[in-house]
Amino acid sequence: MPEHKMVTIDGIRVRAEDETRYRARTGADAPAAPLTRAQAHLPGDKGAEDGPFDPGAHDLPEVNAYLAEANEAETARVLDAEAEGKKRKTLVDRREEYLEEARKRAAAGGTGGGA
């Protein structure tokens, strides 16, 4: 297993090759490329989307996260858009499961996000 040299910056261990990006991201300098995929998609980073949620513009974990909070009508709309667009098997084949989860959230008193 390869060993990475680590640098400690303010108590945080960072790989040596990521030091410049880390310092730029946490310092007063202009923002650098994100260190991790999670940092690339921080809540609120994207700003408001124009129009309704488009599953084709998002990766599978983002679509799953959105569907985990969407109401039944929004879940159906997003899954219909997916079926017309990318047709990812994981989403299309589990349509009824996603809709059932949305129904359970509504029955439990959850307002559900989306539309």
Image (cartoon, helix red, strand yellow):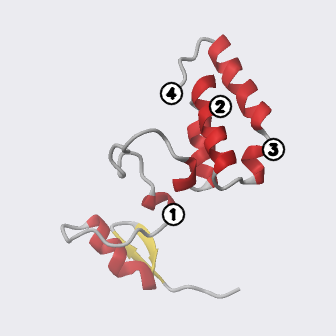
Estimate how packed mark 3 is, as few (under 14), some (14 to 19) or many (20 or more) residues with alpha carbons within 10 Å: few
- Residue 108: % across, % down: 65, 13
Q: Is residue 8 left or right of residue 62?
A: left
- Mark 4 falls on what kind of element? loop
Q: Amino acid at mark 1?
A: Arg
Tell me which residue sits at (65%, 56%) in the image: 86
Q: Earlier in the sequence, mark 1 or mark 3?
A: 1
Q: Earlier in the sequence, mark 4 or mark 1?
A: 1
- Residue 75: % across, % down: 62, 32
Contact between marks 2 and 3 (CB within 8 A): the answer is no
Q: Give the spatial CA distance, label 1 vs label 3.
A: 27 Å
Q: Earlier in the sequence, mark 2 or mark 1?
A: 1
- Quarter assignment of residue 64: top right
Question: Which residue does the numbered mark 1 point to in the structure image?
Answer: 37
Q: Give the spatial CA distance, label 2 vs label 4.
A: 13 Å
Estimate how packed mark 4 is, as few (under 14), some (14 to 19) or many (20 or more) residues with alpha carbons within 10 Å: some
Q: Amino acid at mark 2?
A: Ala
Question: Which residue does the numbered mark 2 point to in the structure image?
Answer: 76
- The label shown at residue 93 is 3
- Residue 88: % across, % down: 72, 54
Quadrant where the image shows the N terminus: bottom right
- The label shown at residue 113 is 4
**4 and 88: which one is in front?**
88
5 above or below 97? below
